Amino acid sequence: MLTPEKIKFLEEKANEIRMSIIEMLIEAGSGHTAGPLGMADIFTLLYFHTLKHDPNKPDWPDRDRLVLSNGHICPVLYASMAHSGYFPLVELKTLRKFGTRLQGHPHREYLSYVETSSGPLGHGLSQAAGMAMADRIDHGIGSQRTIFALLSDGEHDEGITWEAVLFAGKEKLRNLIAIVDRNNIQIDGFTEDVMPLDSLAKKYESFGWHVQEVDGHNFEALDAAINMAHAVYEKPSVIIARTIPGKGVPEFERDFHWHGYDLNAKTAKEDYTKALAELRTLGGKIKSEHQ
Amino acid sequence: MLNPELKLNPKVWNDDVEQIPIRKGFGEGLLAAGIADKNVVALCADLTESTQMYMFKDTFPERFVQVGVAEQNLAALASGMAAMGKIPFISSYAMFSPGRNWEQIRTTIAYNDRPVKIAGSHAGVSVGPDGGTHQAIEDIAIMRVIPNIDIISPCDSIEAKKATLVIAKTSKPAYLRLAREKTGIITTPETPFEIAKARTFWIPESGLAHVGIIATGALLRNALFAARDLEKEGIKVQVINLATIKPLDVDAIVALAKETKAIVTVEEHQIAGAMGSAVDECLAANFPVPIEFIGVHDQFGQSGTPLELIEHYGMGISHIKAAVKKIIGRKG
């Protein structure tokens, strides 16, 4: 359970992490913006409440594993790790620069604290399922380690994602929890225009998963969903987290009107595209990765 | 003559030489590796019988993972298992693994430096009647260009078993190239095997060799037959078994080039980008000599018997002999 004090702490921490993300992206001059800001609350909850981990012993064998599949949102991963104490905050300013440990997409060879290298979409759930499978071979269904797979919605276009969804359902990997960043956007536009995913929940359900849909910015709801996922004994769990790209930066966020915005309105697409371009360049301060 | 130091199979020349598929040696080696180390696990993509993983599966069902016809997941799952301390062996037909899942191998296994062992069965045109779709003749080339993977192409089932046991003990990713068809046994259990160590299987009765043949995989036996015929014609050759294609045994290759000043490479693969190219790159940088390449000339395979296909695509004994004679003419 999260106490009101803990929620306040998490809100403040998420704020600090968002500030770090923006600072590091501006310093780097390029990188992805929408996803990292949108996932800041989830990463804050994981690193400062949920995960069994120890920044002083990053290779502690009994730690939970966090597998970031969509590696392009790594600024939120790096910022969360730095704020947790894995490495100095000042190192965040080296993002994407020559010789940095903070590669443009995470690479274990440079930063061994990340559980896997990632970037090419679709690989994370398979690797997380492999970790969960290995853990079960060693410890049976009573395994005390949880493998968290952080996925984007767009990477559900990749066939391998569904190969992994099939596999985890078949093997009933209860120690696997997938969290999907359901922000409804991908590079070329709305996910439902580029390649419709709905109903994502029903798809997962039919593959034998326990499914929850939550507000990805509500710490209490997220925490409750993770607790429920832990309690599900016979299935892998997916938490489909509704998030707002650019969340926490009013100057961008207000342009989106994600909640309650009439997506059928005449000017919706135009407004949206404009706002997204603003967000992806942080108001013209960095180079968009998509141009 | 066969190099007496290597304790090779004296029956290698006989028509009734024991014929065993190279992939069977992998199956036996995997079982032995599993007995030796409880962290060895096996993952298969719906081809347990063909890839000979059934021996491991029957003995260690709790360490065997069936992933279905999903080679991309096969590779990435194995990477995840390796991250938790396992030594995963994955197997399918080479056309699908590493053919279909090249990028999963690159990113989740090699880039991540996870000790996953990739066994690609049914490599080469000798797959036979199944036809070109199932004959991997590009696999060495696509694995060679990925940093951080050892590539081993055993010449017979005995060598395949040894190679399987050796790669189970390394902390690196490895690609093991296997063939479907039964092939004549060249080595014995006493023949030494080490990663990155080329061995000279045939040496002239006396004096120095005129031409060096470097062969890999089951075609090594054709190279030995060619060498024996050529010796009778007064042409002295040395035949090296280059079982490890990466890392390359540079010293052995350069020494052979210095002795012979002419090299013929022999492999059941596209000529482009494969073992012959690796030898060529090595010699161009260290000791340039003329090279003839025995392999497939930028074509796809087709249905036929293994023997028909090996002959059709120019990898028979007569082709190797012709290449040796041709290169003698090219020597300066």
Image: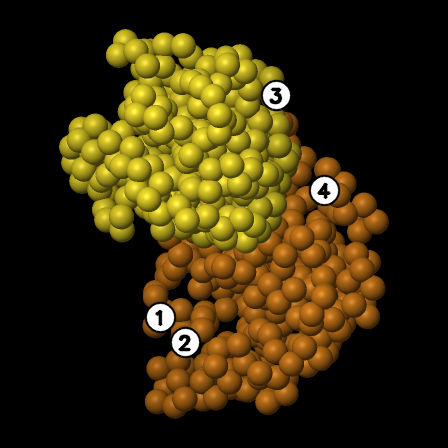
Chain colours: A orange, B yellow
Please tell me whether mark 4 or mark 3 is closer to you in this view.
Answer: 3
Gap between marks 4 and 2 measured at Cα: 37 Å
Gap between marks 4 and 3 measured at Cα: 24 Å
The amino acid type of the residue labelled 1 equals: Val
Considering the numbered disc 2 on the image, is that residue within a helix, a strand or a loop? strand
Subunit ID for the residue under disc 3: B
- Asked if badges 1 and 4 are on one and the same chain, I answer yes
Q: Residue B140 location, x and y as percent?
A: 41, 43
Subunit ID for the residue under disc 2: A
Q: Residues within 10 Å of mark 3 (few under 14, many from 20)?
A: few
Q: Which mark is residue A194?
A: 1
Residue at (58, 46) in percent of width and height: B148
* Count of marks overlaid on the render: 4
In which quadrant of the rendered view does residue B238 lie?
top left
Label 4 with label 2: CB-CB less than 8 Å: no
Q: Which residue corresponds to mark 4?
A: A63
The amino acid type of the residue labelled 2 equals: Gly
Q: Which residue corresponds to mark 2?
A: A189
Label 4 with label 3: CB-CB less than 8 Å: no
- Mark 2 / mark 1, whichever is N-terminal: 2
Considering the numbered disc 4 on the image, is that residue within a helix, a strand or a loop? loop
Q: Is B247 on the left or on the right of A266, as rendered? A: right
Q: Quadrant of the N terminus of chain B?
A: top left
Gap between marks 2 and 1 measured at Cα: 6 Å
- Mark 4 / mark 2, whichever is N-terminal: 4
